[in-house]
Image (tube, rainbow, N blue to C red):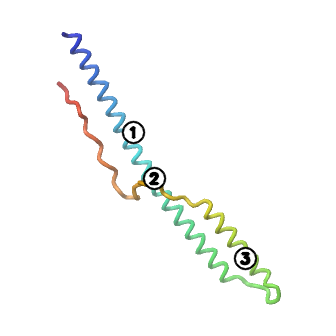
Amino acid sequence: MQELIAKFRETIEKLRESEAAGTTARQSLATRERQLAVCVNNNQALIKMNDEILTRLERTGVSDPITHLHRIRLENYAEETREQAREHLVTAPAGLPAPGASAPPAAAPAVQTP
């Protein structure tokens, strides 16, 4: 009987350790998801800022009245840079919480000490 009780207590301890590890993993995942959401938002803001800078650059460019070569070079540069920015655009995976959203509460241990 004592052997059975000892095995039961050992099983309970392993279950607690497993639940603690699961809780830690869930918390770590929630933290990483929040960090990723912030990075995605920052990336999108930088892409928008890049586009605004390039638009201003295009509008303020000085062009040669005869060949407009400078203006064409600026337009080409702006388009190439926009395309590179689009290639680096990061979007949030489906189901990713928005920055500032709280993580789901951790589950309470299911086993009580006898």
Residue 105, numbered label: none
Q: Quadrant of the C terminus?
A: top left
Residue 35, numbered label: 2
Residue 92 x/y as whole percent: 48, 57
Whichever of labels 2 and 1 marks the residue nearer the N terminus, that label is: 1
Question: Disc 3 to disc 1, how far (Cα)?
Answer: 50 Å
Q: Is residue 86 left or right of residue 110?
A: right
The residue identified by callout 1 is: 25
Whichever of labels 3 and 1 marks the residue nearer the N terminus, that label is: 1
Can you say whether 62 is above or below 111 in the image? below
Question: Disc 3 to disc 2, how far (Cα)?
Answer: 36 Å
Mark 3 nearby-residue class (10 Å; few <14, some 14–19, many ≥20): some
The residue identified by callout 3 is: 74
Residue positioned 65% across, 83% down in the render: 59
The quarter holding residue 69 reads bottom right
Q: Amino acid type of disc 2? A: Gln
Residue positioned 77% across, 80% down in the render: 70
The quarter holding residue 7 reads top left
The quarter holding residue 25 reads top left
Q: Which residue sits furthest right? A: 66
Residue positioned 41% across, 45% down in the render: 29
Circle 1: element type: helix
Residue 26 x/y as whole percent: 37, 42
Residue positioned 24% across, 20% down in the render: 9
Mark 1 nearby-residue class (10 Å; few <14, some 14–19, many ≥20): few
Can you say whether 68 is above or below 105 in the image? below
Q: Quadrant of the N terminus?
A: top left
Question: Disc 2 to disc 1, how far (Cα)?
Answer: 15 Å
